[in-house]
Image: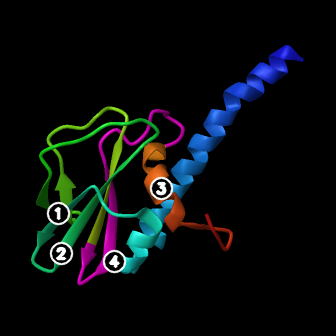
Amino acid sequence: MRVLSLLLLLLLPACAAMQRSDDATLAKHQMLGLSREDVLACMGPPKKKAHDGQTEVWSYLSGDRHGEHFGTSVRSTASSGYGLSSATHDSSFCTVNVVMKDGIVKNVTYNGPTSNLFYAPDSECGYAVANCVTRGGVKE
């Protein structure tokens, strides 16, 4: 019985990490088309903002630990058009970048150490986007 209890205690964090990973995956699709106001409502104010013409990038730190990043700048990328890059990252955070054009979300990208677990990609990113996703028709 003790072994079973210990096994269950070890699996609980893995289940939570997998749900956060799912949230991060869902957000990349479900957040497309949201307005600035929608993003503020579900994610709150961003840590950093960058502008390039009609394109805005809002940057959020996401993770279960505290940390900072510095040296943020907008850069053009072939795959997404725009991204936010940072000179340094605390090892406990994913940086969630919400790319908007004309006030509408066009892309959501993740940078930095996005997961501490090999079986839950982008799990660190799921903290910031959890309130923006819908699971089974119900907003989390």
Q: CA distance from mark 4 to mark 2?
A: 12 Å
Hey, what amino acid is under mark 3? Ala
Q: CA distance from mark 1 to mark 4?
A: 24 Å
Rendered view: 38 above or below 63: below
For mark 1, does the 10 Å Cα neighbourhood hold few (<14), some (14 to 19), or many (20 or more) residues?
few
Rendered view: 136 above or below 15: below
The label nearer to you, 1 versus 3, is 3
Residue occupying image coordinates x 27% and y 74% = 100
Residue 104 within the segment the image draws in magenta: yes
Hey, what amino acid is under mark 2? Thr
Q: Dot 1 corresponds to which residue?
A: 78
Residue 124 sits in quarter: top left
Count of picture labels: 4
Asked whether the residues under the numbered discs 2 and 1 touch, taking CB atoms below 8 Å apart as contact, a structural biologist would say: no
Using the image as rendered, state which of residue 46 and residue 117 is in the foreground. Answer: 46
In the image, 8: left or right of 116? right
For mark 4, does the 10 Å Cα neighbourhood hold few (<14), some (14 to 19), or many (20 or more) residues?
some
Q: Earlier in the sequence, mark 3 or mark 4?
A: 3
Q: Dot 2 corresponds to which residue?
A: 55
Q: CA distance from mark 1 to mark 3?
A: 22 Å
The secondary element bearing badge 3 is classed as: helix
Residue occupying image coordinates x 17% and y 63% = 78
- Give how far across and how far down residue 5 sits, in percent: 81, 23
Q: Dot 3 corresponds to which residue?
A: 24
Q: Dot 4 corresponds to which residue?
A: 36
For mark 2, does the 10 Å Cα neighbourhood hold few (<14), some (14 to 19), or many (20 or more) residues?
some
Give the extent of the magenta segment. 100-120
The secondary element bearing badge 1 is classed as: loop
Q: Earlier in the sequence, mark 1 or mark 4?
A: 4
Residue reaching furthest right?
1
